[in-house]
Amino acid sequence: MTINMKYIFSLIGGGVGWLIAEVQPTFPLIIVVIAFILYDAWSAYQLDKRVKRRYPDKTQRHEAKFTSFAFGKVIRRTIPERLVLIMLAWMAERYVFVHLSIPLSYIITGIILFEQAWSALENNSSCRDDGDGRFWRILQRIMIDKTERHFDISLTEFREQMSEEQIEKMRQRVREWDEQKR
């Protein structure tokens, strides 16, 4: 008994068509999430450019650019993971929580958008000069500084070994060095 390939492809096509029809209401949510993820990747690229400009001799690469590995990770891993979460939340909302009005897909989307917006703000506030504005200085105090990801060494090792006074002296030296370069 041989199974005709036509039937197999018909079943696969029917399954894909059903899945698309089933999760079609999540498409607007998916578009917004993809836009936020791509903006976060762009803000990481902008941070890389600032780090290269400020510390040209200390960074791992010679020029700021999107690496195919990093952007490929966003495309292959981050986006599909987030989209599957939204689709699963939609299906749970539709089939499991039938008698409750819990907008689970919107809650999950909101969490993902918050995560991406927070990451983009961390990227935008990292490696800023004092003259870049008060807003960025305030954000630097409450968010993680992602500058160290662009160096071969961890900045936390220096923070643990140095006192606050030593750190302030080093900051002053960096400011003086920056002013001499200008």
Image (cartoon, grey):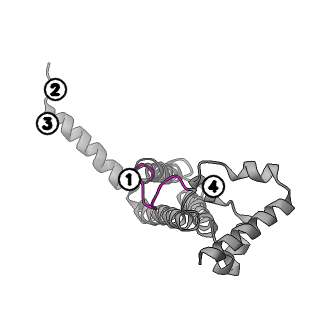
Q: CA distance from mark 2 to mark 4?
A: 58 Å
Q: Secondary structure at mark 4?
A: helix
Screen quadrant of the C terminus: bottom right
Name the residue that disc number 2 marks. Answer: 3
Name the residue that disc number 3 marks. Answer: 6
What crowding class fits label 4: few (fewer than 14 Cα within 10 Å), some (14-19), or many (20 or more)? some
Q: Nearer the viewer, mark 3 or mark 4?
A: 4
Q: CA distance from mark 3 to mark 1?
A: 24 Å
Precedes in sequence: disc 1 or disc 4: 1
Name the residue that disc number 1 marks. Answer: 22
Residue type pointed to by label 2: Ile
Magenta highlight: main SS: loop
- Residue 31 rendering spot, x and y as whole percentages: 42, 64
Precedes in sequence: disc 2 or disc 4: 2
Quarter of the image where one finds residue 107: bottom right
- Residue 176 rendering spot, x and y as whole percentages: 70, 73
Name the residue that disc number 4 marks. Answer: 148
Quarter of the image where one finds residue 117: bottom right
Q: Nearer the viewer, mark 1 or mark 4?
A: 4
Precedes in sequence: disc 3 or disc 4: 3
In the picture, measured across the screen, residue 167 lies left or right of residue 29, that is right
Screen quadrant of the N terminus: top left
- Residue 83 rendering spot, x and y as whole percentages: 45, 53
Q: Which residues are magenta?
A: 59-70
Q: Are marks 3 and 2 in contact (CB under 8 Å)?
A: no
Q: CA distance from mark 1 to mark 4?
A: 44 Å
- The residue drawn where x is 74% and y is 48% is 157
Q: Are marks 2 and 1 in contact (CB under 8 Å)?
A: no
User: Which residue is outermost to the top?
Assistant: 1
Q: Nearer the viewer, residue 170 or 2?
A: 170
Q: Is residue 161 magenta?
A: no
